[in-house]
Image (spheres, grey):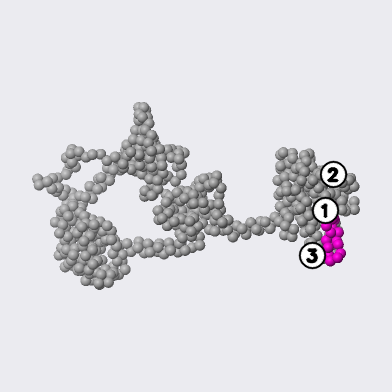
């Protein structure tokens, strides 16, 4: 009985090995012949068959429509709308054919794929196939297969190897008697020698385990547990079952049905695996409660885990998360839900960019704008297993704070006007436009007359009131396209696009008169506030904004020298000429645009 059972096991193992080698050789031959076969089909002028199909992957949870060209029993050419997210291996369902075909992508270009079928269509088996005999196969007159001499010779070596194995092995005959028990199982079950050598039944082995309290279970539940295991062995159920021993070890029990009604029982220690699973569950629970959104994908970019914060952030349902979609499908679903604060014409470009960054494990952070004026910083990190960990952090407060700090760096705190730094950037942009298109622009440089005396006599709070009043009048008088900036102290400047020198002088004179008309009132005492203004227009001969500012400052100093409260727009400090010209043109509105 022992030799028959062991011989059957060895024959089954050798037969399985032969089948595996044969399948590998056939697969290699098919991969070499696929291109030649499809080329011959095109050369013979065969019909180009155009059929619909679906690319199925992710354990049949994801599908992409495709068009099938020139398919044969070896492979096919596919056309898809977008090859983004298609894995290298998938199942192909062709319209009109019942079974799906496992495929491997051989080449891809744009939206065209060339695939080979990894499994041929199952062919009908003929009686001739059953009549074939394997080489050196021995058949006795009764029709039963006898164990080859080589297998009988190796039986002792096989038993010795199984006896040295670290996992428990028990071989049962058709009557469920133990014909072989290896050393590892004897140690697990604390079996005595007399029980081991007496060909015990499996029921006796289970009774001994119950008596010796091997199992980690309460005594009241052992009877039901033993009956369940006996039923599995009798029925040949191959489903793995976990067993916990009283000493803390965890085993995986599995029953394999053998020829002639025998059974092979294996008891594998999986204590370390179970502990790691427990640790993984603790880690998942911890990740699920962090403040960041975390998404973990495998090497094929299929979602494996989405924590609670990410589910809330992207408004994902439990069904979507349990489905474990491909990452390409996930970001498309998120975009379709309207979470992103991105224009519709930019959504597709964003999806492709985001998918490419994750696919290439680009660790550069990417800020995502979502509804509610929130900013989420997304970052991808490559994992040792080939997967990716995607983190999503809410940085709305940081971004808004940075924007506020940037605004403070460009805006004068007192007057809320652009400061010198901001003005220089705007002026350089206008200068570049002038150099390229030759459109005129001018500037006005002015300051408050005797401003230091106002501070010294009435205090700095009154000086601040004078600065605020001048800034407010400038803002009201300027055109929408003009820019008024405070350079520092009592110095101001006006940038006037599309304005020649004469129009700038007219606006400067009007601004000077408006400021003069609104004195400060300190109790019953009015305090006159006047400004001196110098106007200058950009010219081709100038080297840049510094040259233009220098000319405006020279005319400002000329206005001071001529007695203050003047507008100078011509060289030589002729303020009277400028004032007279302005008086004649007072009917000209400051929003008129003039050409050079």
Category of crowding for the residue at label 3, using alpha-carbon neighbours closer than 10 angstroms: few (below 14), some (14–19), many (at least 20): few
Q: Which residues are magenta?
A: 513-531
N-terminal-most mark, 3 or 2 = 3
- Residue 161 can be seen, yes or no: no
Local secondary structure at mark 3: helix
Tell me the CA gap for discs 3 and 1: 22 Å
Task: State the CA–CA distance, disc 1 to disc 2.
Answer: 16 Å
- Residue 534, labelled with which disc? none
Expressed as whole percent of the image width and height from the top left, the position of residue 70 reads 37, 34
Q: Classify mark 2: residues with Cα within 10 Å, few (<14), some (14-19) or many (20+).
A: some
Q: Is residue 117 magenta?
A: no
Q: In this image, 572 relative to 231: left or right?
A: right
| Disc 1 element | helix
Q: Which residue is mark 2?
A: 585
Residue 104: image location, x then y, percent: 37, 42
User: Which residue is at 36% across, 48% downward?
Assistant: 60
Q: Nearer the viewer, mark 3 or mark 2?
A: 2
Among the two numbered marks 3 and 1 on one chain, the one whose residue lies closer to the N terminus = 3
Q: What percent of the width, then of the height, locates residue 48?
A: 38, 31
Q: Residue at x 18, y 49 (%)?
A: 150
> Which quadrant would residue 399 be assigned to in this image?
bottom right
44 shown above or below 545: above
Q: Let me know if residue 97 appears in the view.
A: yes
Residue 429, placed above or below residue 465: above
């Amino acid at each position: 009985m022992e030799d028959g059972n062991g011989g059957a096991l060895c024959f089954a193992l050798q037969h399985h090995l032969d089948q595996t080698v044969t399948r590998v050789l056939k697969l290699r031959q098919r991969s070499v012949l696929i291109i030649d076969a499809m080329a011959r089909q095109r050369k013979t002028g065969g019909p180009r068959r155009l059929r619909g199909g679906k690319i199925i992957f992710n354990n049949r949870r994801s599908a992409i429509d495709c068009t099938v060209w020139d398919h044969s029993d070896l492979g096919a050419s596919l056309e898809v709308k977008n090859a983004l997210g298609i894995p290298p291996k998938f199942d192909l369902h062709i319209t009109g054919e019942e079974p799906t075909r496992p495929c491997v992508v051989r080449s891809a270009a744009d939206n065209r794929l060339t695939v080979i079928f990894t499994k041929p269509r199952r062919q009908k088996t003929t009686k001739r196939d059953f009549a074939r005999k394997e080489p050196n196969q021995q058949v006795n007159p009764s029709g039963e297969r006898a164990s080859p001499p080589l297998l009988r010779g190796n039986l002792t070596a096989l038993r010795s190897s199984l006896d040295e194995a670290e996992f428990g092995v028990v071989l049962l005959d058709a009557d469920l008697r133990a014909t072989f028990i290896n050393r590892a199982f004897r140690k697990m079950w604390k079996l005595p020698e007399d029980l081991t050598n007496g060909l015990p039944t499996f029921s006796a082995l289970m009774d001994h385990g119950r008596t010796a309290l091997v199992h980690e279970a309460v005594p009241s539940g052992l009877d039901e547990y033993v009956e369940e295991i006996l039923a599995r062995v009798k029925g040949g159920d191959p489903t793995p079952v976990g067993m916990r021993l009283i000493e803390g070890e965890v085993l995986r029990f599995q029953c394999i049905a053998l020829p002639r009604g025998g059974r092979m029982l294996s008891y594998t220690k999986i204590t370390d695996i179970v502990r790691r699973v427990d640790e993984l569950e603790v880690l998942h629970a911890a990740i699920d409660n962090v403040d960041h959104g975390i998404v973990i994908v495998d090497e094929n970019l299929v979602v494996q885990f989405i924590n609670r914060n990410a589910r809330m952030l992207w408004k994902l349902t439990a069904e979507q998360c349990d489905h474990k979609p491909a990452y390409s499908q996930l970001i498309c679903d998120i975009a379709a839900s309207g979470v992103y604060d991105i224009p519709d014409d930019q959504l597709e470009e964003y999806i492709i960019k985001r998918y490419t960054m994750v696919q290439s494990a680009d660790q550069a952070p990417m800020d995502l704008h979502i509804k509610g004026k929130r900013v989420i910083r997304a970052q991808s990190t490559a994992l040792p297993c080939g997967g990716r960990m995607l983190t999503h952090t809410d940085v709305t407060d940081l971004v808004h704070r940075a924007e506020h700090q940037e605004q403070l760096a460009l805006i004068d705190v007192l007057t809320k006007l652009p400061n010198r730094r901001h003005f220089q950037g705007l002026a350089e942009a206008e200068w570049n436009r002038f150099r390229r298109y030759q459109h005129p622009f001018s500037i006005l440089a002015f300051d408050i007359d005797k401003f230091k005396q106002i501070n010294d006599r009435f205090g700095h709070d009154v000086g601040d009131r004078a600065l605020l009043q001048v800034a407010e009048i400038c803002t009201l008088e300027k055109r929408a396209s003009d820019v008024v900036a405070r350079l520092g102290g009592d110095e101001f400047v006006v940038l006037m696009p599309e304005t020649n020198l004469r129009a700038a002088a007219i606006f400067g004179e009007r601004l000077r008169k408006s400021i003069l008309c609104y004195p400060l009132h300190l109790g019953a005492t009015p305090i006159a506030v006047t400004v001196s203004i110098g106007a200058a227009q950009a010219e081709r001969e100038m080297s840049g904004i510094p040259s233009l500012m220098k000319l405006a400052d020279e005319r400002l100093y000329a206005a001071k020298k001529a007695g203050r409260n003047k507008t100078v727009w011509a060289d030589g400090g002729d303020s009277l000429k400028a004032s007279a010209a302005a008086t004649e043109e007072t009917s000209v509105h400051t929003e008129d645009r003039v050409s050079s």
